[in-house]
Amino acid sequence: MPKKIYIIFIAVLICCTKNSKGQEYNYSIHLAGGKIGGINATLTEENGVQYYEIESDVTFKVLFKKYNRKTIHRVKYSNGTIEESYTAVYMNKNQEDSASLVHLSNYEYRCFMTEKDEPYKQHFGPIKFPTAMLYYKEPKGVNKVFSERFLDYCPVKVLEKGKYEVYLPNGKENIYTYENGELKSVFIDRTWFNIEFKKM
């Protein structure tokens, strides 16, 4: 099956296999003190299988030109590991990149990334804590989480009680802040700007 068609198939499969309503959280996205968009995070569970769906939508201007950036992030999780995942990033409706993986057996995964010409297989071990789970569970005692976008593990550092720094494979960091085990904000520190997600 061609790479692009297979990635679309995984996205549709994850989306269509969940049909029960679960936990839903919403976050506003802020840049330079102003609101530029939002995030909708949904977690459903059926027959012991968890389905995470995170979608963001932001609109911003650079030199008077308007841009719209959307991300789609879906994860199927069961038996203590990811079974399937799919992520995609769109800029002004054009897909910039995407990634997906499927659990084959014994924690070996079939992986797809836009930046790679061919799919590949990789053994990750049990992927116990995907980044999608950060919206629903504080990573107490967790020293690494798995990025479904970069298809790699990210080290986690405790900054203080309820505050964690996640180091991404691209060399950047995000800071997650929790109160009573609930995610309240995400701070994204970048070279030229800072973005913050705030729970609504």
Image (cartoon, grey):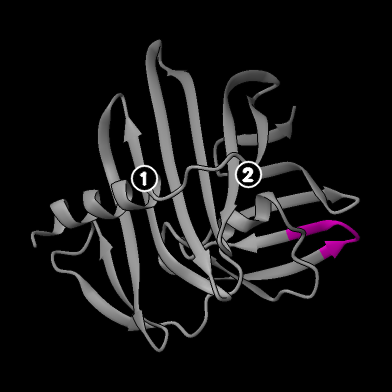
Q: Is residue 173 above or below residue 103?
A: above
Instruction: Answer whether residue 31 is magenta in the image.
Output: no
Instruction: Answer whether residue 160 is magenta in the image.
Output: yes
Q: Residues within 10 Å of mark 1 (few under 14, many from 20)?
A: few
Q: Amino acid at mark 1?
A: Cys
The residue at the point 68 percent across, 36 percent down is: 25
Of the residues under marks 1 and 2, which one precedes in the sequence?
Answer: 1
Q: Residues within 10 Å of mark 2 (few under 14, many from 20)?
A: some
Q: Amino acid at mark 2?
A: Ile
For residue 16, the mark is: 1
Instruction: Label the magenta part by its dominant secondary structure.
Output: strand
Q: Nearer the viewer, residue 68 or 88?
A: 88
User: x, y percentage for residue 125?
Assistant: 48, 85
Q: Which residues are magenta?
A: 159-164
The residue at the point 53 percent across, 75 percent down is: 127
Q: Is residue 36 above or below residue 190?
A: above
User: x, y percentage for residue 62?
Assistant: 42, 20
- Marks 1 and 2, Cα distance to the nearest angstrom? 31 Å
Q: Nearer the viewer, residue 123 or 143?
A: 123
Element carrying mark 2: strand
Q: Quadrant of the N terminus?
A: bottom left
User: x, y percentage for residue 31?
Assistant: 62, 26
What residue sits right under mark 2 in the picture?
Answer: 188
